[in-house]
Image: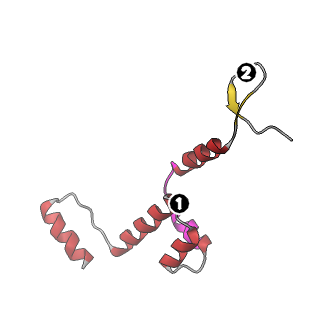
Amino acid sequence: MVREAVRRAQEFVPSIPRLTPHDLRHTAASLAISSGANVKAVQRMLGHASAAMTLDTYADLFDDDLDAVATRLNDQMPLVALPAGPQTRYARPQ
């Protein structure tokens, strides 16, 4: 069914690449994880035995995810003025 749909689409746009149901599954899982979906939910969606298997397979595909994590962590830090210096996000030791 998917193969036939792709073939028909390629008649109109020959540059459309070959696509399989597994490609669609991989894309759905990768996008779910990248968008912040609960890994246990994605694990169940895919029928994996463990969340570790899901993460090992799909979580490393988006390089900009590390930047997004750093930005979110930085946004959670309080903005403080250090003596005689610029304002910065800094966790003061208690």
Which region of the structure is painted magenta?
Answer: 53-64
For residue 39, side relative to residue 23 (left or right): right
Q: Residue at x 19, y 70 (%)?
A: 7
For the residue pair 94 and 54, the one nearer the viewer reads as 94
Q: CA distance from mark 2 to mark 1?
A: 36 Å
Q: Is residue 68 above or below residue 2?
A: above
- The residue under the point 30% across, 68% down is 19
What residue appears at the point 64 percent right and 42 percent down from the top-left corner?
74
User: What amino acid type should be assigned to the residue bearing mark 1?
Assistant: Gly
Helix, strand or loop at label 2? It is: loop
The kind of residue tagged 2 is Gly
x, y (%) of residue 93? Answer: 84, 39
**Residue at the outermost left position:** 12
Q: Is residue 78 left or right of residue 33?
A: right
Question: Based on the displayed image, in which of its 4 quarters is residue 9 positioned?
Answer: bottom left
Q: Are marks 2 and 1 in contact (CB under 8 Å)?
A: no
**On the picture, is 68 further left or further right than 23?**
right
Residue in front for this viewpoint, 61 or 18: 61
